[in-house]
Image (spheres, rainbow, N blue to C red):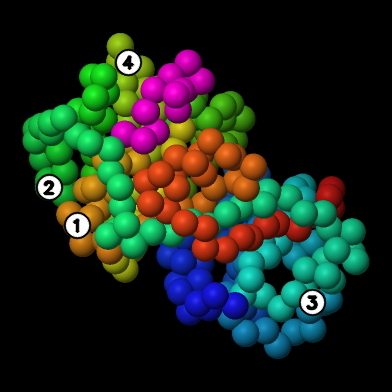
Amino acid sequence: MPNEAYMKLIEEISLNAWPSHKIELYDGWLIRFSHNYTYRTNSVEQVGQSLIPVEEKISYCEKVYQNYHTPSNFKINPLLDPSFDQILSDRGYEIRHVTEVMTMPMDHFRPYGQVSAEYEYYGRNSGLPSFIEYPSGILVQLRDRITDDWITSLFRLNGTTNPTLRRIVPSMFKAIPKETIVAFIEIDGRMVASGLGILDRGHVGLYAIYVDASCRKKHFARSICSSILSEARKKGAENAYLQVVAENTAAKNLYQSLGFEDFYTYWFRSLETL
């Protein structure tokens, strides 16, 4: 297995980066629930040693998700014994949401060239510029905290309309315990691209990279990512990581052009328990 210790670190800091609405610790397993907002926050993750027989544990988790009226999801990564994935397959679980984890040492980072930067915003972490300008007049705005306006605009970008999710997800973002770099691009006062950097133990994770369909292929995502990564490096980040859906070729091409490389793959096993 390639660098098991580093894989464990990435799993740990990415778990910190994206809290769930509810979490239950059960014999070394985290049962996470967030009304199906994402697979990561609605799945079982193994984080410690287990003493209870595995079949008994799976049945327990299935009952928990049945009470939540959602499918049972288990996250499968290379740190787990392959037999666990087979056990779930034998119970009828299907593979969902195959995800590539990509990493990058900051000395491999190939940033998009900035035109200028303005320092007007003085918040909790006042070292951030308020605006970074890129070619073609692209202006990336940066903030040091997640605001309600940013979350509302993010919902519009990623198509979140469910009233329950619009109620609970803001508290999930605001529960992130780490320093954040919030990025966005506006056109006529309307957010058309977003990004979030989360700093933890010398790393920055890229999250919430969305671009409005009308604004794609204009280097908006490249500008957002470059802004977050450049500012994170100034704050001491020596490495970066991200998670991208395996079939998202356009996003992977962008990340590779910035200097990211594939590290490992994880997926979810899902079973309808309604």
Q: Nearer the viewer, mark 2 or mark 3?
A: 3
- Marked residue nearer the N-terminal end (4 or 3): 3
Tell me which numbered mark, 2 or 4, is placed earlier along the sequence.
Answer: 2
> Dot 2 corresponds to which residue?
127
CB atoms at circles 2 and 1 under 8 Å apart?
yes
Residue 75, image x, y percentages: 66, 62
Q: Amino acid at mark 4?
A: Ile
Where disc 3 sits, the SS reads helix
Which badge, 4 or 1, comes first in the chain's sequence?
A: 4
Kindly check if marks 4 and 3 are in contact, taking CB atoms under 8 A apart as contact: no
Q: Position of residue 73 (x, y in %)?
A: 72, 57
Q: Which region of the structure is painted magenta? A: 211-223
Residue under label 3: 83
Q: Is residue 176 visible?
A: no
Q: Who's the residue at 12% across and 46% down the image?
A: 126
Spatial CA span between label 4 and label 1: 29 Å
Q: Kindly identify the residue that appears in the image at 82 percent across and 66 percent down.
A: 88
Question: Helix, strand, or loop for circle 1?
Answer: loop
Q: Which residue is mark 1?
A: 235
